[in-house]
Image (tube, rainbow, N blue to C red):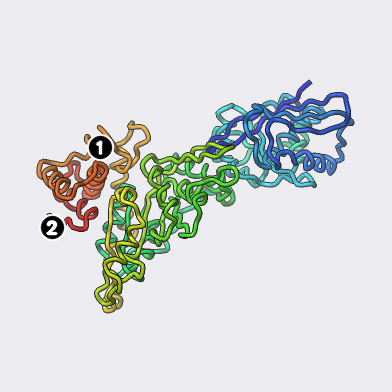
C-alpha cells in the first residue's frame, strides 16, 4: 500500500502542491527517488537514511520507491527531505497514514535528525491553507509560516519530535506569528540643507509611486536625499506586507519570522549582473526589482550600470511584473517598485558646476547621459537637477519640514488614492492608473488642459510622457487636497519632466 504526504515546488512566488508517494515492495534492497528531482532532492535519501538511523529506525531490506507527483514538474531544493521522511515513516506505519496524507511538509534534515530551516515557508503556508491541510516545517520557520492565519502550522525541532507529535506522545502547540518589525526613521529630511526643489520632487514621487531621476555634480546630495525616502513612505498595508514578504521568504530575507511593515529599500551596486537585478540564476530566484516590490529601488551611478541591465528595466516598469524565462524554468514575479536613479551630468561630474568647468563640455555630458536610452528616459516621471550646496549654507540651522511632517502629507495623499482606486483591480496609486481610469481621475480643467496640449505640441511629448504628466499632476493635486486637477498642478508636473518648461 502506498503512503502519501505532500510538499510544494516553487514557481516564482507560487507554491505548487506536490504529492509525495512512498511504496515499499519486495525485491533487491534499494532506495530510489523519481519524479524529476534535482541533485539536492536526489541526495535526500542519504540524509533521510542517516536521520532515521540516529533515531534507531532501520530501513527494511526491500525496495523503497519515492515518487514526486506530478512527475513532469521540476523538483529543486533541500526542503523535500522532511516530506520524504514523513511519507516513508507513514509507509513503515510509525506515524499514522491518515495524518501524513493531510500534511504539507517542507524542511531539510541534518544527519542527526535535526530540522534545518529552509526558504519559502510563507508561500508554502498559503498553499497549505488553500488546500485545507496542516503545514509541517522546522521550528525556525514556524513564526514566519504562522502569519497565514488560515494555516495550522506545526514546527518541530527534529524528526523525533515530529514522530512524538503524530503518535500523541508529546503534542506540539501550533506556531504563532513572529513580531512585526516597526518603522525606523533614523535619517530625517530636516537635516538636509537647501535642495528644496529636490525634496519636493521626492515627496511627489513617494506620494504617487512615480519614478524619479536625480542629476547633479558629485557631492551635491543625491544619495543623501535618496537615503531618506524610506522615512517618508507609509507602512505597508497587511495585504502588501504579506505579498512582499512572500518574495522575501523565497530569498531567505525574513528575520526571526517577523514580517516587515516598512517598505523595501534596495540599492544594488552598479556592478550587479542582470540576474541579480532582474532575477534568474539557479532556480530563477527573484532579483532586486522584485525584492523592491511595493518599495523603492535606488540605483546610484545610473549610467554606470551595463546597458543590457538598464534596458531590461523598461518592460517591468510598465507592466509591474517580470517573467524570468530559462530552459528549465519559467517563473513570474511581481515588481511594482518606485525607481529612484541618481547620475552625474557627465563623466567627470562637473558639467553643470559653474565653479569647476568640465574640460570636454558638452560632449562629455552627451556621451555619458547617452548611455540611458530615450525609451528608458521617457519612463521617468520626474527629472530633477540637484545643484551643489554653497558652503555658507552648510552652517545654517536646520530648516524645512521634518520627515514625520512630510510622511503625514504623503499618508493623506495615499489614503485619497486608496479610496479612489477601491474596486479598480490592481490599481493602488496614481502611477497604476491608465486608459479610461486615468482620464476619469486626472483630466485637468480647461486651463490646465490647454497648457498641457501646448507643452505636448512644443516639445513633442510621446503618448507615454503625456500620460505620465497627468499622473504626476493628479498626485500633486492629492497632496494639495484638491479633487480637481488645476493649471498650477499641471504646470508643476511639466516643470519636473522638461528641463525647458520655464520657456513655455
Query: Residue at 66% of width from left, 40% of height from top?
Result: 137
**Quadrant in the picture for the C terminus:** bottom left
Q: Earlier in the sequence, mark 1 or mark 2?
A: 1
Name the disc covering residue 503, or none: 2
Q: Is residue 183 left or right of residue 219?
A: right
Whole-percent x, y for residue 443 in the image: 18, 39
Whole-percent x, y for residue 300 in the image: 40, 61
Any part of residue 478 in sight: no
Q: Is residue 231 left or right of residue 69?
A: left
| The one of 367 and 280 positioned closer to us in this rendering | 367
Identity of the residue furthest to the top in this view: 1
Distance from Cα at disc 1 to Cα at disc 2: 27 Å
Report the residue marked by disc 1: 438
Name the disc covering residue 276, or none: none
| The one of 143 and 357 positioned closer to us in this rendering | 357
Any part of residue 50 in sight: yes
Q: Secondary structure at mark 2?
A: helix
* Tag 1 and tag 2, C-beta contact below 8 Å: no
Other residues around mark 2 within 10 Å, as few (<14) / some (14–19) / many (≥20):
few
**Quadrant in the picture for the N terminus:** top right
| The one of 498 and 10 positioned closer to us in this rendering | 498
Q: Secondary structure at mark 1?
A: helix
Query: Residue at 62% of width from left, 42% of height from top?
Result: 142
- Looking at the image, residue 246 lies above or below residue 502: above
Amino acid at each position: 500500500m502506498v503512503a502519501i504526504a505532500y510538499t510544494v515546488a516553487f514557481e516564482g512566488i507560487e507554491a505548487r502542491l506536490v504529492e509525495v508517494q512512498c511504496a515499499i515492495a519486495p525485491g533487491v534492497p534499494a532506495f530510489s527517488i523519481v519524479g524529476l528531482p534535482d541533485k539536492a532532492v536526489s541526495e535526500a535519501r542519504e540524509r533521510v537514511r542517516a536521520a532515521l538511523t540516529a533515531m534507531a529506525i532501520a530501513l527494511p531490506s526491500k525496495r523503497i520507491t519515492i515518487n514526486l507527483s506530478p512527475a513532469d514538474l521540476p523538483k529543486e531544493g533541500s526542503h523535500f527531505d522532511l516530506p520524504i521522511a514523513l511519507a516513508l515513516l507513514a509507509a513503515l506505519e510509525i506515524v499514522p497514514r491518515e495524518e501524513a496524507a493531510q500534511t504539507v511538509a517542507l524542511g531539510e534534515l541534518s544527519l542527526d535528525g535535526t530540522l534545518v530551516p529552509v526558504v519559502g515557508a510563507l508561500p508554502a503556508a498559503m498553499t497549505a491553507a488553500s488546500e485545507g491541510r496542516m503545514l509541517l516545517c522546522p521550528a525556525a520557520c514556524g513564526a514566519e509560516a504562522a502569519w497565514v492565519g488560515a494555516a495550522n502550522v506545526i514546527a518541530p525541532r527534529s524528526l523525533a519530535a515530529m514522530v512524538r507529535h503524530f503518535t500523541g506522545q508529546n503534542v506540539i502547540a501550533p506556531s504563532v506569528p513572529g513580531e512585526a518589525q516597526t518603522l525606523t526613521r533614523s535619517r530625517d529630511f530636516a537635516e538636509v540643507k537647501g535642495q528644496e526643489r529636490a525634496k519636493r520632487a521626492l515627496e511627489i514621487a513617494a506620494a504617487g509611486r512615480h519614478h524619479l531621476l536625480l542629476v547633479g555634480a558629485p557631492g551635491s546630495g543625491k544619495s543623501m536625499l535618496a537615503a531618506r525616502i524610506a522615512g517618508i513612505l507609509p507602512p505597508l498595508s497587511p495585504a502588501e506586507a504579506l505579498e512582499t514578504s512572500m518574495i522575501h521568504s523565497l530569498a531567505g530575507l525574513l528575520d526571526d519570522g517577523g514580517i516587515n511593515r516598512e517598505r523595501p529599500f534596495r540599492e544594488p551596486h552598479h556592478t550587479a549582473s542582470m540576474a541579480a537585478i532582474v532575477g534568474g540564476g539557479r532556480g530563477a530566484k527573484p532579483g532586486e526589482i522584485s525584492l523592491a516590490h511595493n518599495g523603492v529601488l535606488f540605483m546610484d551611478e545610473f549610467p554606470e550600470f551595463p546597458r543590457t541591465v538598464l534596458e531590461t528595466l523598461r518592460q517591468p516598469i510598465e507592466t509591474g511584473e517580470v517573467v524570468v524565462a530559462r530552459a528549465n524554468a519559467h517563473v513570474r514575479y511581481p515588481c511594482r517598485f518606485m525607481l529612484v536613479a541618481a547620475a552625474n551630468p557627465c563623466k567627470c561630474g562637473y558639467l553643470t558646476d559653474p565653479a569647476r568647468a568640465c574640460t570636454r563640455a558638452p560632449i562629455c555630458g552627451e556621451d555619458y547621459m547617452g548611455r540611458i536610452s530615450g525609451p528608458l528616459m521617457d519612463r521617468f516621471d520626474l527629472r530633477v537637477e540637484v545643484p551643489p550646496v554653497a558652503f555658507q549654507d552648510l552652517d545654517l540651522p536646520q530648516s524645512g519640514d521634518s520627515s514625520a511632517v512630510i510622511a503625514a502629507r504623503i499618508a493623506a495623499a495615499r489614503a485619497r488614492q486608496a479610496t479612489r482606486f477601491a474596486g479598480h483591480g490592481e490599481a493602488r496609486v496614481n502611477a497604476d492608473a491608465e486608459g479610461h481610469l486615468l482620464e476619469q481621475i486626472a483630466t485637468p480643467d480647461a486651463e490646465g488642459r490647454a497648457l498641457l496640449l501646448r507643452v505636448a505640441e512644443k516639445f513633442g511629448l510621446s503618448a507615454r510622457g503625456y500620460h505620465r504628466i497627468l499622473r504626476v499632476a493628479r498626485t500633486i493635486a492629492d497632496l494639495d487636497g484638491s479633487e480637481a486637477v488645476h493649471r498650477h498642478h499641471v504646470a508643476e508636473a511639466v516643470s519636473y519632466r522638461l528641463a525647458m518648461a520655464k520657456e513655455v
